[in-house]
Image (spheres, rainbow, N blue to C red):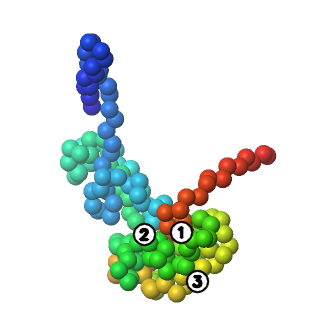
Amino acid sequence: MLKRTIVLFGALLFVCTTLTAREPLYVVNGEVVASIEHIPHDDIESIDVLPADEETIARWGVEASEGVIVVRLIYDTPAVFEAEGYTNFSDYLASVVNWREPNNVERVSLRLKIGKDGRARVDEVLQATSRQLLRRVERAIDEAPLWRAAMRDGEARETQHLVNLQLPLGGRREVEHSVIIL
């Protein structure tokens, strides 16, 4: 697809023609979506890449003229956390973990497994700048209300969820730079 841009540089007028790439059509669990960037890799069961041939265009329409990427997730409906007025698990944790001033600004990043029973548990600690904060977050996760488990074909599925938490809220932590010499 050609795109024309008019550029005014001083008293001169330029017309620039650039070639812009079109993207394939993305279909997730049978529904057309704008992007698949937000889907965690662990939630993907399969990916099929369909060419931009007559059969694909006949089935999906002219939007499929650059091909179709069909993604099948491990669930039909994702796991959802809804408790005490919160729909975001990180916001919930920030509200129940007691980490206020004058504590240092600390960060915890975790991979959680949301079980078929809706219980969240820590699967992997990705980063923890404070063991004390990590223990408090782990305790809050153990005591948290249940999630509504992910479902596929009427059956609960175990899924993963990432939690990135920096407390106290609004605090800034300096980025630590390091060099690894092999």
Q: Secondary structure at mark 1?
A: loop
Viewer-side label of 3, 1: 1
Viewer-side label of 3, 2: 3
Residue at point 35%, 52% (across, down): 35
Q: Secondary structure at mark 3?
A: helix
Q: Vertical placement of 117 versus 37: above or below?
A: below
Q: Which residue is label 3 attached to?
A: 139
Residue 168 marker: 1
Quarter holding residue 85: bottom left
Residue at point 42%, 69% (across, down): 74
Front-most of 181 and 98? 98
Q: Are marks 3 and 2 in contact (CB under 8 Å)?
A: no
Q: Is residue 116 left or right of residue 133?
A: left
Residue at point 65%, 65% (across, down): 129
Query: Whole-percent x and y of residue 175?
Result: 62, 53
Task: Determine if residue 162 is in view.
Answer: no
Q: CA distance from mark 3 to mark 2?
A: 29 Å
Query: Whole-percent x and y of residue 97?
Result: 53, 78
* Crowd rating for badge 2 (residues with CA inside 10 Å; few <14, some 14–19, many 20+): some
Q: Is residue 20 left or right of residue 100?
A: left
Amino acid type for the residue under numbered disc 3: Arg
Q: CA distance from mark 2 to mark 1?
A: 35 Å
In the rendered view of the protein, which quadrant contains the N terminus?
top left
Q: Is residue 73 left or right of residue 41?
A: left
Residue 74 marker: 2
Viewer-side label of 2, 1: 1
Q: Secondary structure at mark 2?
A: loop
* Crowd rating for badge 3 (residues with CA inside 10 Å; few <14, some 14–19, many 20+): few
Q: CA distance from mark 3 to mark 1?
A: 17 Å
